[in-house]
Image: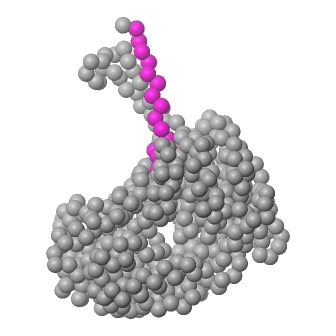
Amino acid sequence: MPKDFFSHLHDKKTPPTYKFFNGEAWMDGASSKTVEVISPIDNSLVGRIPLVSNLEIDQAISNAKKAQEAWMRVPMIERGKILHLAADWMREHEHYLTALLIKEIGKNTPEAKDEILRSADMIDYFAHEGLHVKGEELSGEAFPGYDQTKMAIVEKVPLGVILAIAPFNYPVNLSVSKIAPALITGNCVVYKPPTQGAISCLHLTEIFYLAGLPKGLIVTITGGGAEVGNYLVSHKDINGITFTGSSQVGKEIAVKAGMIPLLFECGGNNPAVVLPDADLYSTAIEIVKGAFSYSGQRCTAIKYVLGLKPTIDKLIPMVSQKTKEFIKMGDPRIPEINLGPVISDGEADIIERRILMAKAQGAKIIMGGKRKERLIEPTILDLVRPSMEIMQIETFGPVVSFLRVESIEEAVKIINSSDYGLQASIFTSDEGAGIQLARQIKVGTIQINSKPQRGPDHFPFLGVKGSGVGVQGIRYTLEAMMRPRPIVLNKPH
């Protein structure tokens, strides 16, 4: 892709100031206020994004509402063709988008490339599965006291204006998981990208329009969450919100949004339970991958491991050894590097403080624990207790804690007492025992002999307690973007 392919998205300065899309055109912000996007890799300025005003937001949402009224009448198969073409655009120019993603959020090349290609696959899958959405007919005679004089035609209709709020760690993929299902089901999208990741997301918006999407159906609003996000979530014309981010922010949004449909994926703080019969070699590998991929900045990362004392005693040296073998820390632009910097100085401060606090409270640092600017060494903590802050609050970094329990029942009690409930892993050679244990754990998904993960994307994906609202996954997300509309026919007696 030529470097000037998206030149109309920004001014011609270096580094550039980007525009936002108000549904009709790429626009400079009415004010001169901007937000800087700093690369976590080398602290360089990637670009600036406008801080969009409330008046500009109102006009953009008005544009979207008008466009949605026409879009919902476009046949599903025609909507799908546009989405398939958008997916093709992403694949054709994956190299350009991957390089941008690496620079902006500090992923290594394989992880960034996988995000782009997986996003294209997801768009295709949503477009295909959308064709299978259908309503139903219901007869009154199926319920006591009624007869054939009543029949309901139950249609599936779009919610209308969907607010999509994406996180920094998967800015493209977790935007696509919101935008594609909203569009195929006839909605329009008011899109709030993360500040860190916004530039990649602006390119994503343009890709949908290059594929032929009618104007107005995606409006992309940039700026900080405190200024822009708070206004958006309480806007009177928003009909539904889909959000990925922290549990604290999710709860705040839910209060401000009021009585509209919500689809939230929030914090994880995911545990792994290792039973005595587990294959410790493969378990150690899964723990390393689960704890340290993308520097632990994943809601599905393993954050703590529980097991009986003999099991943990054997497991920790193996996890340490596999960490030394597999994890190479440094500049993620270097091919062999697979653990880069965390997203910001502020996040690095939080991670470092939690490690030091755990140590002060009696935890033992088995390996890692040191910091150089935004690089946090892969850190293994032993002798951790449930009361420590490192256990109580999700730490978005490359840190995994080990706890010894007296019984597996104690492990279940610790997990179920958490405010989080996204995923958990169980490692065992007896799948039947694993299933029985899984039924006792109060989280959205339990993985047997694997690290937590979101995919495959057509599986149901959900959190309970403070980890989310609603169910995602291709078919489930499509359902969440629509509501039933019963039209009841009444025949004369």
- Which colour scheme appears in the figure? one colour
**Which residue is at the far top?**
493
Q: Is residue 488 magenta?
A: yes
- The residue located at (47%, 88%) in the rendering is 377
Q: Answer with the quarter of the image where residue 412 lies.
A: bottom left
Left or right, 209 with respect to 388, comes to right
| Vertical order, 483 against 306 (above or below) | above
- The residue located at (54%, 67%) in the rendering is 170
Q: Answer with the quarter of the image where residue 76 lies.
A: top right
**Span of residues in magenta:** 477-492
> Is residue 439 or residue 137 the one in the foreground?
439
Where does residue 209 sit, x and y in percent of width and height? 70, 53
Where does residue 31 sit, x and y in percent of width and height? 78, 60
> Is residue 187 or residue 458 the one in the foreground?
187
Please identify the quadrant where the N terminus is shown.
Answer: bottom right
Left or right, 58 with respect to 468, comes to right
Where does residue 229 sit, x and y in percent of width and height? 60, 57
> Is residue 58 or residue 268 the one in the foreground?
58
- The residue located at (57%, 88%) in the rendering is 373
Q: Does the magenta stretch include residue 319?
A: no
| Vertical order, 144 against 158 (above or below) | above
| Vertical order, 161 against 388 (above or below) | above
- The residue located at (77%, 52%) in the rendering is 25
Please identify the quadrant where the C terminus is shown.
Answer: top left
Where does residue 187 sit, x and y in percent of width and height? 59, 43
Q: Answer with the quarter of the image where residue 424 lies.
A: bottom left
Please indicate, yes or no, whether residue 31 appears anywhere in the rendered image: yes
Tell how many labels: 0
Left or right, 23 with respect to 117, comes to right
> Is residue 340 or residue 138 the one in the foreground?
340
Please indicate, yes or no, whether residue 23 appears anywhere in the rendered image: no
